[in-house]
Each structure stands twice: as structure tokens, then as C-alpha cells.
Image (cartoon, helix red, strand yellow):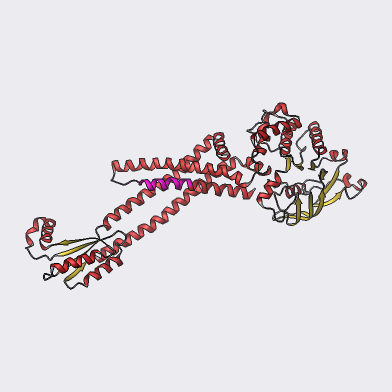
Amino acid sequence: MIRLTDVAKEYPRSGVALAQISFEVKKGEFVYLTGPSGSGKTTILRLLYMDDKPSQGEVWINGVSSKNATGREISRLRRRLGIVFQDFRLLEDRSAEANVRFALEVTGAPKATIRAKVTRVLTQVGLASKATSFPRELSGGEQQRVAIARALINDPFVLIADEPTGNLDERATRSVFQLLRDINSSGTAVIMATHDLDLVRRSNYRTIELNHGRVVFDSSESPASERPIEEPWEVRETPPDSTEQI
Amino acid sequence: MRSAREALTASRRAPLLSALGIVTIAFSLFAFGLFGLVAINIRKALDEVEERVEVRAFLSDSADIEAVAAAMKDIGDFPEVLRIDYVSKEKALERARKEMGEFADVFEAGVLPASIEVHLRPGMRSPSSVRSVADRMKTYSFIDDVRYGEEWVEKLYRLRNIATVAGIALGVAFAAVAIIIIGATIRMTVLARAKEISIMRLVGATDMFIRLPFLIDGLVKGVLGGLLALVFVWVANRVVNEYFMQTIFFDRQLIFLGVVGGAVMGVLGSLFSVGRHLRRI
């Protein structure tokens, strides 16, 4: 479903962001992408939703290859992905419901379908009662739920989440995480970048750890005891990918 | 349909920005329009002067009237010739007396020769074609002399060339400035909606889908700006007519072209701004 083969990414100014990255994600899998800031988590996610192309190697996702994907193919691919960010990325001048609807409207879906689906996903994330609220009227956790609802509206085969709990307090983090688990248990794969070690330790999902743009640990290949997770993470001085905006 | 609705909604969300955009476009097109007005008036003045370009052939006294008539028919068939007139000795005298006013008496009957006057078609008044007509006329045996103010024709022609080149250069410069301003205006709209565009891309909207509302926005602003500029130019023309000098205004075709030009600039400006934005993110 998702395969990265010997992927490297270099930026002209900040240098090597990723090197020799190879892994696969299977249908319905839950994968943590961990590592210190600047280790390349966000870069990998951006390569997955084809916001950027690898300098070397190949990213293969749902039949689309980074080597020859056209703009139209990338648009079609993204309609089958759900993407969630730390900063929610909601449109401030629209209600929760309008934000969710927006994602379907741009794909040209018929009106009746849109209405039914919006109600369904807002109920799924537990925000049916706040459909008409604007983002500023919602808590951080609620805003992230709206963002997740938006990501779910196109029935994605994988949910890509970049530090989805990074801006949330303990309680909101737990509930958003539970929501992601529920989504995963209904068959959607989840790839979640996080540096919340507690979260990673508490659950038994596959963990891919990055450092300096390389995979240093993949729990699907090594026994959990070899996990170098107790070591303090070394933080890079100039994170190559944290300045990249989409 | 959706794109048009989207464009309209976007304008309603930021009415001030839209109004500012239209006025900015109107002013840049106004400058372009004023220049155009000056250019067509200079052109008209030059055309009027050029209409006076004529070739005059003086006939010898012994000329056979039938041969002259035949020659006039031949000359009238030259592709360059618009009109050909016969000026008899009497008419030449009458004309000369009228022009000389109080010195009318210096001319005596029979002093001035008869002549034929040839007017050339517009576009056939360049020095080379005037010379070529004159040369062909000289071949008739009963034509003594052919005059056409050689130097004057050449000067006029040069002036016209300079005016044309200057007109095109300035026109292109004004149009470029207008396009840049329109592009910048639309870029403001694009930047104001940058977040929306980035989210649209993330959820799988195609570039065309994102671009279309902006193109419609540019088109509408270009047309409205063009119409507003037209009103400004019209008022300016009225003022000049009222207080300074007689000028002509654009004809319907030019007005239509101007508004279409505004629309095209609006679309080009949008295409450029959105394209650049989409490539960058």
C-alpha cells in the first residue's frame, strides 16, 4: 500500500534531511513515526502526500509513484488520504461544518452526498452538536477533531497525522488519540508523527524511529527490547524540515 | 458555475479589497486609455495632412485633349490612385487669383498651364509610391513637368514612422505596467486566501479547480476596471473638448477592444499570480 525504497531528500540550503529510508506500511496498520525535532518526520509525511519529491529513491503509495506522478494523479491520491496537522489548519471564517464540507466540495461531490457525509463524520468525532461553531469558539481538542473529521470525509485508506496532539493538553491528547485508534480499528491505516514518548510507550503499535534523517529503529524488524527509546534525543541545531511550509 | 459562485463569495468576503482592485485596474487602464486617445488624435492629424499629398502634372500647350482624356483614364486605373482631376488653364488662373488675393492682377490669362491632379489612396502615400506614380506620369509626351513636393512627402513620412514606433513602444510599456499592476492587485487576493488554497491542495483539489475562481475574479475585475477607465477617459476627453481643442473619441470597435483588453489583462494577471503561487507552495 505504502512503500518507500531507499529514499533520500536533500534541500539546497539545509542539506540532507533524509537518507536511505526504506519501509512499508500495510493496509490498516498503525505506525508511529518518532524522533527528535529535525529528524525528518515531517519530511517523510510530506513525501507521502507528495507535497515534495524525493531527491533519490521512490515513494510508492496506492499505485502512485513519486517518479512519474502527474498533478492530476497527486490530486486524486490526496482525495484518498486524510491529513492532519499540529496547527489544525482550519479556515477561521467558516463554521466547523463548513470546514468539513469544504474538503468534499473541492472534489465536486453532489450536494446530497455532502450533507449526509458531513453529518456522519461530525457525529463520528463527537462534534455533531458544535457543527455551527467557528474555530475560535472551539477548544484546541475540538478544533483538532474538526480537522480529523475533514480528513475522514473522503473515506481515506490512510490517515497521515503530523504531531496531531502537539498543541493539546493531556486530556485532549488522550481523547484525540483514542479517536485515532477508533479510526484505525475501523480499517483505516494511521501514520502518526509524534515526539510524545509517553504516548508511544503506552501503546503497542509499530514504531519507526528517526534520527538525523535515518531510520534508527523499526519495531517490526527488531524486538521491542532493543528499542533505544530511553536514550535522550539529540536535537539538531537547524531542523531542515521544520521551516518548510505547505 | 461553482467557480463563478466561489469568485463572488470571495469578493463578498473582502469587499474593500475587491473595490480597491477594480479601482487600481481602472487607473492603470485609464493611463493606457489616455495615451491611446492622444495616439489616435495624432494619427488623425497626420492623416489629414497626408490627404493633401498629390501629384500634379503640367500639360504642354499643344496637348491633344483626347490624348489627355485617354491618359487620365489610364492613370486613374493605377492601383495607387484615388482620384484624378483635370485643371484647365482658366481654372488654374481662377484658383491662383483667389490664393493671391490683392495680387490677383499679376496673372494674365494663358500664363498658367493646364494640369492634372492625382490624389493617392491612403496607405499609398509613401515617398516611394508617390515617386513611382510621378515617374510613370512623366512618360506621357504631352506632360511637361510633374511635381509632388518630394521633400515634404519624405518629411511627413518620416514623422509618421516616428509617431508609429513611439506609439507602439509607449503602448507596450503602458500595457506592461497595466498588466503588472493588475497582477499585483490579484496577487493580494491570492495571498489573502493563501491558507484556503493550501488546504484545497491538501484535500485534493486540482490546480485548475483552484485557479478557475481566480480567473473569473480577474476577468470580472478587468471588465469592470476597463469600463470604469472608459468613463474616466470619456470625461477627460469631454473636458479637453470643452476647454482646449477639438479631439475625437474612440469609435465603437476601439471601445470594445479596450474592454476586451481589460478582461484579457485581468485573466493574464490572475493566471500569472495564481500560477506563481501554486508553483511556490
- Residue B85 appears in the rendering: yes
Is residue A103 or residue A20 the one in the foreground? A103
Give the residue furthest to the top.
Answer: A129
Q: How many numbered marks, from 0 up?
A: 0
In the image shown, does B81 or B219 lie closer to the viewer?
B81
Query: Does any portion of residue B148 appear in the rendered image?
Result: no
A156 or A223: which is nearer to us? Answer: A156
Position of B247 with respect to B5 (left or right) is: left
Residue B152 position in % (x across, y down): 26, 63
| Residue A128: in magenta span | no
Residue B53 versus residue B184 in the image, above or below: below
Q: Inspect the magenta stretch and tell me whether residue B252 lies in it.
A: yes
Residue drawn at x 74%, y 36% is A148
> Residue A21 in the image: x percent, y percent?
80, 53
Q: Quadrant of residue B109?
A: bottom left
Image position, residue B37 (x, y; %): 36, 48
Q: Main secondary structure of the magenta part?
A: helix
Residue B16, horizontal then vertical, whole percent: 52, 35
* Picture quadrant of residue A134: top right
From the viewer's perspective, tell me whether residue B94 is left or right of residue A198: left
The image quadrant where one finds the N terminus of chain B is top right
- What's the residue at 16%, 71% (across, down)? B142
Image: magenta residue range: B247-263
Please name whichever residue, A185 or A115, is drawn nearer the observer in this view of the structure.
A115
